[in-house]
Amino acid sequence: MDEVAILGVGMHPWGKWGRNFTEYGVHAAREALVDADIDWNEVGFVSGAVTVRCGYPGYVAGSTFARALGFNGAQVASSYAACASGVTALSVARGQILSGACDVAIVVGADTTPKGFLAPSEGERPDDTDWLRFHLVGATNPVYFALHARRRMALYGATPNDFAMVKAKNSRHGVHNPNARYPKEYGVEDVANSPVVSDPLRLLEICATSDGGAALVVTSMDYAQSRGITDPVRVAGLSTVTPTYPDTVIDLPYLATDSAAAAEPPPLGFKESIGAQVYDEAGIGPEDVDVAEVYDLSSALELDWYEQLGLCAQGEAESLLRAG
């Protein structure tokens, strides 16, 4: 048995609340415990997703959340992987359960972000490609997103209207989610009339810095069955892959060279390998997916991920979007 069950979920609404990240995580954790109908004292492991923007408590997020919820003797861990911190924390909790170290774990992630563009962490890191794009060419996150958008326009005929359609589509879902950052529906014209941030991307097409939190209660399958839950929601697969040489350099369209020019490229690019790994573990293919919640740091990057996750062929994301 290599599956774990998800018995409860919780979330703190996303916005700019001006409070400590711990409060958001505790709110989400308590919601998840209520949803799972599990007492806090049954939790044997707390897996915290680290935030590097909230000082030392953020670095030891597992301990921070455990203390705030009330120390109960549970083991803890803290994981950081930037935008992948959540899945990394879930992976650690799953490993604890599958190893037999515990039957019930809670995964908690939360953040409090500053206003404006997120900057790289302090310190010199000349071997860090993300640090390099900031310091060598001054490419902030919106500039990085816009370069990807320009590449789609040049290679596949994407238009600003396509990017606006992505935002409009997502807002139609967000309006039904009380925890969404913007629970409001925007039309294509609303997006097109918002200010340009980094051409061709506009204000409503770029992910806003936000405060909030989320939590999952995960358990062994035996524990779920002992509670009379015979067919729980399962974690079918997780993917936290790293690049394969020579696909290991900064991903910055038009401003970077790739070492693959001097070496045979890997069979799959880095981003394509992420989806391939999780499909393989889950024993399915992209053709089996009915609902996909796709990474959307910007409206244009979402289109890239349709293709990188195998939901359509390369260059066909716009056609998929336009077809509804």
Image (tube, rainbow, N blue to C red):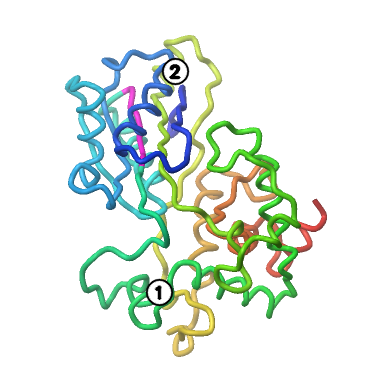
- Image coordinates of residue 205 in percent, x first then y, are 60, 59
Q: Is residue 204 left or right of residue 249?
A: right
Residue where numbered disc 1 is placed? 248
Residue where numbered disc 2 is placed? 36
Viewer-proximal residue among 56 and 126 = 56
Magenta part, dominant SS: strand
- Image coordinates of residue 21 in percent, x first then y, are 31, 39
Mark 2–mark 1 distance (CA, rounded to whole Å):
41 Å
Above or below, 109 against 205 in this view is above
- Image coordinates of residue 160 in percent, x first then y, are 71, 68
- Image coordinates of residue 93 in percent, x first then y, are 33, 35
Q: Is residue 38 left or right of residue 297?
A: left
Above or below, 195 against 115 in this view is below
Query: Splitting the image into 4 quarters, where does residue 124 fall?
Result: bottom left
In the current view of this chain or complex, which residue is farthest to the bottom?
262
Q: Is residue 209 left or right of residue 152?
A: left
Is the residue under label 1 in contact with that under label 2 (CB below 8 Å)?
no
Above or below, 324 against 202 in this view is above
Which residue type carries mark 2?
Answer: Ala
Q: Residues within 10 Å of mark 1 (few under 14, many from 20)?
A: some
Q: Is residue 123 left or right of residue 310?
A: left
Magenta-colored span = 103-110
Question: Image point 52% across, 55% down: which residue?
Answer: 207
The N terminus sits in image quarter:
top left
Question: Image point 41% across, 67% down: which residue?
Answer: 243
Viewer-proximal residue among 29 and 73 = 29
